[in-house]
Amino acid sequence: MAKIRTQKPGWFSGKALVMVLYILFLLIPIYWLINMSLKTNEEIISVFSVWPRHLTFDNYKTILTDASWYMGYVNSMIYVVLNVVISLTVALPAAYAFSRYSFIGDKHLFFWLLSNRMAPPAVFALPFFQLYSSVGLFDTHIAVALAHTLFNVPLAVWILEGFMRGVPKEIDETAYVDGYSFPRFFTRIFMPLIASGIGVAAFFCFMFSWVELLLSRTLTSVAAKPITAVMTRTVSASGMDWGVLAAAGVLTIVPGALVIYFVRNYIAKGFALGRV
């Protein structure tokens, strides 16, 4: 009889310990950010402590009551949602065309889309600034949303094309035989089949647009200034306001964490099945 090989408990415990230590190491910056947000600026500068000696929520109160702070979150959320909607609306039919049809220059066009994603945002900051200033879009939410589509649409097309290629073409043909029009087939049958891919694409579009700083700061000044730009302007006559800046950083993490929570199942399927 063949011997059954069992895993040694010590080996399992060792791997678990390494994993726990690694997770704790990753959580240190987040904990330290929360720790700083609950301290006064004087305590942050003067002493080193692993927890607040004088617990205070004044930093969060400043952000939630000062319009120059909380409007940064509102502005960011507006253009991020606009960007996700526009990016997915453009990427879905484009990815379907790449996955279902062959045409002259399709591979070159697909590579050109990806090359836009490879370019740094600094390359497009000046052209966008001059263009939007000329047409009256400077310092508007739609300006930042449209600028971010230059990077998010290629990424969304690349992700969605991998999911769509995995759906058999026979489903399209069967739907047409049954009398479905293309819009009805695409929304009623095809999109539910690639729901995980749409979730993954929406997640990456949201995260890039939420954390991007250069374009959002260059294309806004007052009315549409995002929180990432507001956080870079915390220097006063008394110096850097570390506590308020740390509190702003904690609140900036919250929307991303909520998005991850609601699309976590789609993300898991996307990493397992799609082209990510």
Image (cartoon, rainbow, N blue to C red):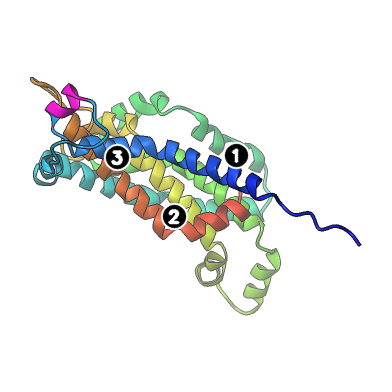
Give the mark, 2 or 3, whose residue is nearer the N terminus: 2
Magenta-colored span:
42-47
Give the mark, 3 or 1, whose residue is nearer the N terminus: 1
The amino acid beneath tag 3 is: Ala
Residue drawn 32% across and 32% down? 213
Front position in the image: 222 or 104:
222
- The residue pinned by badge 2 equals 89
Cα distance in 3D space between marks 1 and 2: 19 Å
- The residue pinned by badge 1 equals 109
79 vs 72, left or right, is: right
Residue drawn 22% across and 32% down? 231
State whether residue 138 appears in this view: no
Residue drawn 65% across and 56% down? 165
Task: Answer with the quarter of the image where residue 223 lies.
Answer: top left
Nearer the observer, disc 1 or disc 2?
Answer: 2
Cβ–Cβ below 8 Å for labels 1 and 2?
A: no
State whether residue 172 appears in this view: yes
Label 3's element? helix
Categorize mark 3 by other alpha carbons within 10 Å: few (<14), some (14-19), many (20+): many
192 vs 170, left or right, is: left
Task: Answer with the quarter of the image where residue 270 lies.
Answer: bottom right
- Residue 59 percent coordinates (x, y): 14, 39
Categorize mark 2 by other alpha carbons within 10 Å: few (<14), some (14-19), many (20+): few
Q: Magenta stretch: residue 44 in it?
A: yes
- The residue pinned by badge 3 equals 143
Label 1's element? helix
The amino acid beneath tag 1 is: Leu
13 vs 77, left or right, is: right
Label 2's element? helix
